Image (spheres, rainbow, N blue to C red):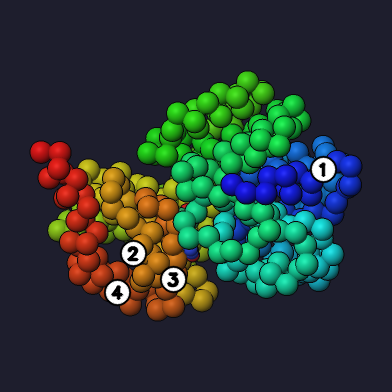
Amino acid sequence: MHNLDLFKEQISSSSPKKIIITTHYKPDADALGSSLGMANYLKKKGHEVLVVTPSDYPSFLNWMEGNDEVVNFEDKDKKKWVGEKIQDADIIFCLDFSCLSRLQEMGDLVKSSKAFKVNIDHHQDPEDFAEFTYWSTKAAATCELVFELITMVGDKDLLDQDIAECLYAGIMTDTGGFKHPNTTKNIHLVTAELIGLGADNAKIARLIYDTNSLNRLKFLGFALTRRLEILEDCQTAYFAISKKDLRKYDSRTGDTEGLVNYALSLDGVKIAALFTEKKDGVKISFRSAEEVEVNKFAATHFKGGGHKNAAGGVSDLNMKETIQKFEYLIRENKHILFNQLELINEKNQ
Ligand code: 5GP
Ligand code: MN
């Protein structure tokens, strides 16, 4: 933690600033919740704030306060205007990501802007691109860090129900509904404060988890019966979803979110993957249990990264070749991937 005074000075109400807040491609609840939570706070401090996402995001997030003013950079009519806003900004907040490549096309624009850059994140291996960084891999969610930072600068009294609900959403989803090992004492304390501020936890859970379309549920049934493969000798299970499958169920952004967890929920499975065919390759989500580190696997073999138990990557090969590569690598690296687990088990015996 450094330069808190410099950050405080930058966001001081005494000199209103033009602020852009952005987050990673295909934002999830932590990405959007931290962005809108921060935006609502900075607006209360008197700043002019614009939230720009590098892509669209699932409709189950659009209840958050400020959602209607979010600009999607992929919206052709807005691209030029957003580019000018980025060049003209005094401060750019980059939330829930640490590598500018996760902004895709927007990355170069942010990099070349003269704005004071702030990076708040909990992913591994951050790039050093910001003037102020508040970063910890120990944090369960970027929303947790946003809460802490606002508290540290002495503005806790500016938090309200709208901000609390945005932050609660990110914490709820990034902890897998308070199930993952990142569900610490601190995250419960922060969550208690958010509920104290009026965050309606039951309402948010319903808005995020219980607003499925019938197509999405049918797609889930189809994926579970027809697209789930198991590598029993490797404690691994995966889904491979083609463009045709997505079209058949009129798939929308967010419809595949959470699917990979069904593969991991199988008894005995420690590594799960979801392969989704895109226009220009295959997008991959990895999940793992216990000590198995999928982020290193994703970084080494699939140009990706992430957290120990939840990572992602991409493949330029077609689906069949990608699956072949994955199966080969899992078998080849079985001992490395499971080694730590075995060591720990041995130690505990
Ligand atoms: P998801 O599977 O939910 O898309 O992503 C899980 C986690 O993996 C994210 O929180 C993010 O940390 C990481 N991740 C996903 N895709 C990528 C990627 O293409 N590159 C990197 N570096 N990390 C990714
Ligand atoms: Mn996050």
Q: What kind of residue is marked 4?
A: Lys
Given contact means CB atoms under 8 Å apart, are the residues at marks 2 and 3 in contact? no
**Which badge, 4 or 3, comes first in the chain's sequence?**
3
Q: Is mark 3 on a helix, strand or loop?
A: loop
Real-space Cα distance between discs 4 and 2? 12 Å
User: In this figure, which residue is indicated by the disc labeled 4?
Assistant: 325
CB of mark 3 near ligand 1 (< 8 Å)? yes
Q: What element carries label 2?
A: helix
User: In this figure, which residue is indicated by the disc labeled 1?
Assistant: 12
Q: What kind of residue is marked 3?
A: Lys
User: In this figure, which residue is indicated by the disc labeled 3?
Assistant: 303
**Which badge, 2 or 3, comes first in the chain's sequence?**
2
User: Label 3 crowding class (10 Å Cα cut-off): few <14, some 14-19, many 20+?
Assistant: few
Real-space Cα distance between discs 1 and 2? 42 Å
Q: Is mark 1 on a helix, strand or loop?
A: loop
User: Label 2 crowding class (10 Å Cα cut-off): few <14, some 14-19, many 20+?
Assistant: many
Can you tell which of label 1 and label 3 is closer to the viewer?
A: 1
